[in-house]
Structure formats: C-alpha cells, structure tokens
Image (cartoon, helix red, strand yellow):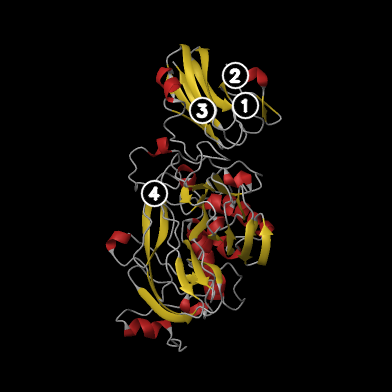
Amino acid sequence: MALDTNPPDQRSEQAGRPPVEPIDYHAAEGIEPPKEDTRREWSLVGAGLAGLVAVVAIVVAVVALASSGSDSGATATAAATPAAASHDGQDAAATAPTLEDAKGVAFEKFQPVDPTLPDPVTKVEVDVYQHVTQVSKDLAPTEVWSFKVNGVEHRGTGASAPIVVEEGTTVDFTFTNGGTKAMKVDMPHALDFHSAEVDPGRRYADVQPGKSISYKFEAKHPGVFMYHCATQPVLMHTGAGMVGMMVVKPKNLAPVDRELWITQQEFYIGEPGKDADMAKMNAKQPDVIAFNGFANQYADNPITVKKGEKIRMYVLNAGPSIGSAFHVIGTVFDKAHTDNGVQSHVQTINLAPSQGGWVEFTLDEEGTYPFVNHAFGDMVKGSMGVLKTENAPEGSGHGGHAGSDHGAASDDAAAAKADVNVEMGEMFIKADVDRIEAGKRTFAVKNTGSTTHGMAFAITPVKQSGGMLDESALQSKGKELSPGESEVITADLKPGKYELVCFIPGHYAAGQKLAFEVR
C-alpha cells in the first residue's frame, strides 16, 4: 500500500494550516537528551526553575526521581513539586478532596460509557478537549484532558474512545488540538501511536491550540495498543487523562458473540475542579484507578451478557504508572492474546503500563461475574465491574455492587422503620444521612458487597493496634453479614463525633469507614 511520505509541515500546508514544529521525542518520552543538545536541555531546566516552590523542594524531588529512575525527562517539572506518597506507601499521601469539598464547582454530569467495541475504520480524526468532570462519584471533580475520536466524546468521565482498525489498513490520520472554542484547549498537545512505525520526531510533534497535523501509516501489527499525548512532560499529560486504546484486529480473527473494551486508567485529583496533582503522579499515588474513565461504573450498572455466549474483552492498561492484573471472577480465559504472548487456560493477564491484549471466555451459569484488577489495593480505588447474565438470580455470586441501588441500603420494610439506612460493600460504607440526634436510634444495614462485612460505631479518634481496630473502641457492634444479608442495629448514642466502621480485620485500614455525627 502506498503510504504518505510528505513531512507533517507539507501536509499541513496542503491543508491550508500553519506548519508545526518537530519535537525532540527522546526528551518528550523522558529519555536523557544528547549532551550536545544544550538548547533543549536548558529549556527543560528553565521550565522547572520557573515553577520552583522552594530550593528544598527541588533537592528532595530530584533526589527521589534519581533514586527511583522514573521519568528522568520530566525532572524539571517534578523538581518544582513537593514529594507525595509513593505507591509503596512510604510517605503520607495527600487526601483526595471529596464532593463535599467541591461546593460551587461546576462540572459535567456522569454519562455511562458504552463498553461495546466500535467497528473498524480507515480514517481517524482525533481532537482534544479539556473538561471538568468527576472520575469517582464520591470524590471532587477534576480537570481532565481527553481525546475525541471520530466525533465521539465521553463527557462526564475521563475516558477517551477506542480506535479500531484492521491489520494491514492504511490509516488516514488527522490530529487537531482543540478544533473549537468549546474544546477549551489552552496548551500544546501531541499524539503518539504505539501501533505505528513512523518517525516520532516529526509525526508526534507538538501541535498548538487550534492547529492540526495529518499523515498516513500502515497498521502492520495486530494487538491492543496505547495511544497518548507525547508532549513534555509526558507524565503530566497522561496522568491528566490523555490516554486511549487502539485495537488492530488481526486478519481472519474468528467471530464471537460479543466484543467489549476496557481501559484501566489512573487519576490524580488536585484542588476541586482544577489541574491534576503532579506531586501524586511523581509519587505513583493515584486517587482513582478506573475502568473506562469512571470508578466502579460497571459495578453500579453491570454489563448485561448471555449465558454461554462467546465473549472477547479487549483490555489496555493505560497507566501511566500502576500495573494491572485483569481477572474475571467465576471463569477461566480460554485464550489470552497479550504483549506477553498467546496462552490458553489463563486465570489472570498481567499488564504493565501501556500493555494490552484480549481474552476470550464463556460464562457457563446464570449469575453475576465481577471483572477486577486483582491487585486488590488498587481495585478498591475503582477498577471493578460486573458482567451479569440476563437471567442471573438476585444476590448471586460475587455480586459486588451488582443489583444494588446505593440509596436503598436495606430491605424495604426495615428501611421504612429505621432512622438511618446504611450500605456496605468493597471497601465503602454509605448512609442516607451523616448526622442524627442523640438517643436510641435504629440503623438498617445491608451488605451489597461480594465479601463478609459488619458494622460498628467508633468514637473518634478511633483506637487502633498494629493497624487493626481496637475492640475497646467499638460500640453497638452488629453481626457479620454475608453478601446480600441485612440487619437492624439499635444504638443508644451520646453526642459526639463517630465513625461507622467495618470491623472485619483489614477492612477499616482499606478505607471502609464513614464519618458520622451525633448531636
């Protein structure tokens, strides 16, 4: 197939657009520039110095980056930011702001993302838009930078639509950086295809707001690839949402009954409604790790499938920094095609940041089948969903959030009589009120999760011993509830600050608690 060999500036001029400047792609991807490239080197240093908070912050951040070996090309920006917690939990991370902290901040309403894989195309038009949205329903909104693909936007989430082509296709590609004022773009961006074999210095050039670049490339290699912004520092742009999936379908791929796409993505929430938190990015401490741009969206609203049908799920770990162990509870993958090879009889696929693949399986019984990041410390940050068969019995399997209403926390009869309705799941506690008058009060508690939970009251500050709740701190302790079980707890409460807690070992430490006030 004939490929477009014109450099990007000629293509842009032919289209009536101003030429774009090529980038030093090695620096953009965090690779040390050659020693003789002093102009680029000093521009990076200057960018970092312009944003210094303090000399101490520079030293701490640079030393931390040097010792970790991460994103050396982003040193200038990282140096301007105080260190936060690492993913290993070595330091205390900044607490994610909640929705309560975001009063007065305007943001987009959540819109569910259809996980059905789109049909293959040959022409791809990608645009950039900046928007303020939630990425978890309990946390403050954040500004996200997203990609619009062939007219498809996912407002109300941090997701970017997948690009699907067939192996051997010549892709006619145009990238526009904020084509209209409604896109609200105010900085340069670029786009890097992991599926293409092109000169990155020209093709992945920074594009100024309102400008475009066009070229063609042949999709020679089948697989699930990442596309992302390549503008320096790459960590900032990918950590603020600029990632997506490109599927190159192999020739003669056998048909299946259903094809779904799942992109795992991290979010680092800063001040409500403002930029993502760069310090958290450098520390690899995400607030949210979501599937398709919004935490637990497919757990709250399961994906309906049929018993016995052949399902193919295309999975990408877009990172930018945390790994993924993708697993569907209740089944075994018949085949898994990933960057790590082709395997049969697979329980979990392990994907480093930027790796992808697809898995094929059937669900042999009616039921609810959660799909999760099996790194559970990351899963509880939002990387969980549910496949639910059409005739699944209520409360079946590992239901997770499946079938729950998040506003109805107990059986109707108990909820009608109780003063407070409480719902427990992985790893959360929710209540329909956060304060109540002192005295004898009833709490209707329901476990909508996939594992055993149990509620108790604890006066703050809550006593702990060795990371576990101190039994002496617990009051009006309920019983251990299996998935789907309910109970009503009666408590004689005195005025004060409390927490509703799960007393199952390890659950409180994983975040299963809720502030509660008695007046």
Q: Amino acid at mark 4?
A: Thr
- Residue 207 located left or right of residue 349: left
- Mark 1 vs mark 3, foreground winner is 3
State which tag comes first along the sequence, 4 or 3. Answer: 4
State which tag comes first along the sequence, 1 or 3. Answer: 3
Q: Secondary structure at mark 1?
A: loop
Determine whether label 1 and label 2 are within 8 Å by CB: yes
Q: Which residue is mark 3?
A: 446
- Residue 503 is tagged as 1
Q: Secondary structure at mark 4?
A: strand
Q: Which residue is mark 4?
A: 133
Query: Residue 28, image x and y in percent?
Result: 53, 69
- Residue 347 located left or right of residue 455: right
Q: Secondary structure at mark 3?
A: strand
Q: Amino acid at mark 3?
A: Lys
| Distance from the alpha carbon under mark 4 to that under mark 3 | 30 Å
